[in-house]
Image: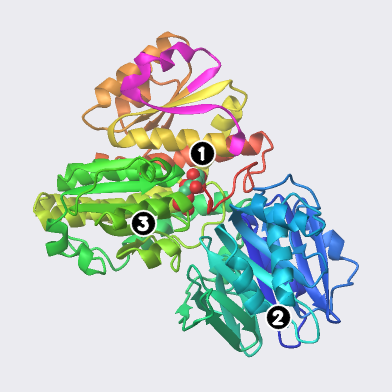
Amino acid sequence: MCGIVGAYLSGEPCLAALVEGLRTLEYRGYDSVGVGVVLDGRLVVRRKAGRIEELERELSDGALAAATIGIGHSRWATHGAVTDANAHPHLDWKGRVALVHNGILENYLELRAELERRGIPLRSQTDTECLAHWIGIELEGTDGDLAEAVRRALRRVHGYYAIAALAGGARPQLVVSREGPPLCVGHSAAGAWLASDPLALVPHTREVVFLEDGDVAELAPGKLVVTRRDGTPLARRPVHVDWKAEAADRGGFEHFMLKEIHEQPDVVARALFGRVEADDVRFEGELFGDAALRGVERVVISACGTALHAGLVARYLIEGLARVPVDVDFASEFRYRQPVLSPGTLALGISQSGETADTLAALRLARSLGCRQAALCNAVGSTMVRESEAAILLQAGPEIGVASTKAFLAMLVASVLFAVRLGRARGTLALAEARTLLGELGRMRMNLERLLAREVVEGIRALAERHKDQRGFLFLGRGINYPIALEGALKLKEISYLHAEGYPAGEMKHGPIAMIDRQMTTFVIAARDSVASKVRSNIEQIRARGGPVVCVGDDEESLAVADERIVVPGLSPWLSPIANVVPLQLFAYHVALARGCDIDKPRNLAKSVTVE
Ligand code: F6R
């Protein structure tokens, strides 16, 4: 949800670093892009509605090439349409401050009215421009000290923000702050950098400082001064970030999404690495030890979107293997519905980014009600990981494709590991069963490689070609594979814009069956489990009404009665979601490709939803 970057280099031009950083963060928003730099002491802004290529055309005259200090922004519109005027950076009315912003200023109408009363001309419909003017106003009373002006201006603001402010003059200043959305910085003698995501910093430094809510920091080469909004100095330690810079390129694949789908065998291996013993699982932290887990009376999972689907799978695993009751909730609902929580409740947040506003709020609510909390999260230094008592890191590596694939798979693997740990700690999972499950998980990498073999992928591509013009799609699953039906439908909707619905197979007769005809393809996920024969009957019922059925799974009899099939290697039903989701990801990808959709930048979506 908007990406911000900045660079202050000692002597080197900064434009390449800004554009490269924006390209890395483009997944966060891609409505408009812009940069602001200091050139001969003056602020110069170039910004455009559209993709980064538009900005590069704007910059091709070389006029900004000598600048060594600048900020940049990639926008996902919240206030104001997608126009050049609403693109960031925004300047204050005297052109002394340039500002980029990710978030929402909730009292911006009030700020706007006050600016209008003071006769300050407003040139855009954005909340950000209002803050740029307020910083400009405060600059007049602080003798040109940008950090103090930012602190004072922010005391007037309510809302969520990560900002970078740049002032020109003989001594340029670069100041950042956050309240809500993520922001990290790094510095060395060669320069100082800032970004919404550490991925944009790793080409420059691996020692990354993750700013906390309320921090205001001034940056320059070799310098980082952090204070609270009231000016109290603070010490912030850097964290070493291990991610490889190459993780942010497509590595020969046509899209990030396809690359990330193909990374999944490695993702499983990484999620297991160092955690699996012969018949148990080891996680860092007292919360995952026997004593603490024996005290867990109930688990409450909060998440959004794809992560919520992982939470639904986790419910089956935790209840089935550890016999602990589990509730799973949309974080956006949980946070507003006055949940009843007792101290024996473990609140579990699941998130790829660790920055999703609703999921963070849900965990904070659980904490305020006395629950212990843990995170299943991919982003190492994210707010969720820092705020939670304990975290299981997914270790999937950076996920750039807007439609989540490999992070979901890692969430499923982590959920199995957590359920096994809980089951072993509580004595509900027999040693032999734990050993069998973990052994099979160890072979999962090989099974996924088989699913991603060229001939299988080619078969799915051809299937997508045959079904790409259907009126709609129904995805059915039952038991632990019901959430996989939801995920298959979500993937298809997100990137192909076709209507798709995920449903529990047993519910089909209570409504969705009315939609069945030749133009409605139904995917049925059929694992060899206790409900296999019932799912098989669903296939017969759909076919009897003329609806084409594609069966995905390892239940041979279901596969045999469907019109078309994708055979998945035979697995324990507990692990079947991990494999069953892969063909559905590939199907969504190939339908979107065949329909000419922009797969890595689907319309209206942003990867990280840091506002409500
Ligand atoms: C779907 C997708 C979204 C995210 C959701 C939560 O492909 O990516 O539905 O799953 O926005 O994001 P995280 O996991 O970052 O909390």
Q: Is residue 444 visible?
A: no
Ligand 1 closer than 8 Å to label 1 CB: yes
Identify the residue at image location x=15%, y=52%: 423
Q: Is residue 22 above or below residue 203?
A: above
Instruction: Give yes or no for contact between labels 1 and 2 (Cβ–Cβ under 8 Å).
Output: no
Label 1 Cα neighbours within 10 Å, binned few <14 / some 14-19 / many ≥20: many
Identify the residue at image location x=48%, y=33%: 489
Q: Which residue is mark 3?
A: 364
Magenta residues span 495-521
State the SS at label 2.
Answer: strand
Q: Nearer the viewer, residue 529 or 569?
A: 529
Please, what is the three-letter code of the amino acid marked with disc 1? Lys
Q: Which residue is mark 1?
A: 491
Q: Which residue is mark 2?
A: 173
Marks 3 and 1, the one that precedes in the sequence: 3
Label 2 Cα neighbours within 10 Å, binned few <14 / some 14-19 / many ≥20: many
Q: Is residue 74 visible?
A: yes
Marks 3 and 2, the one that precedes in the sequence: 2
Ligand 1 closer than 8 Å to label 2 CB: no
Identify the residue at image location x=63%, y=42%: 604
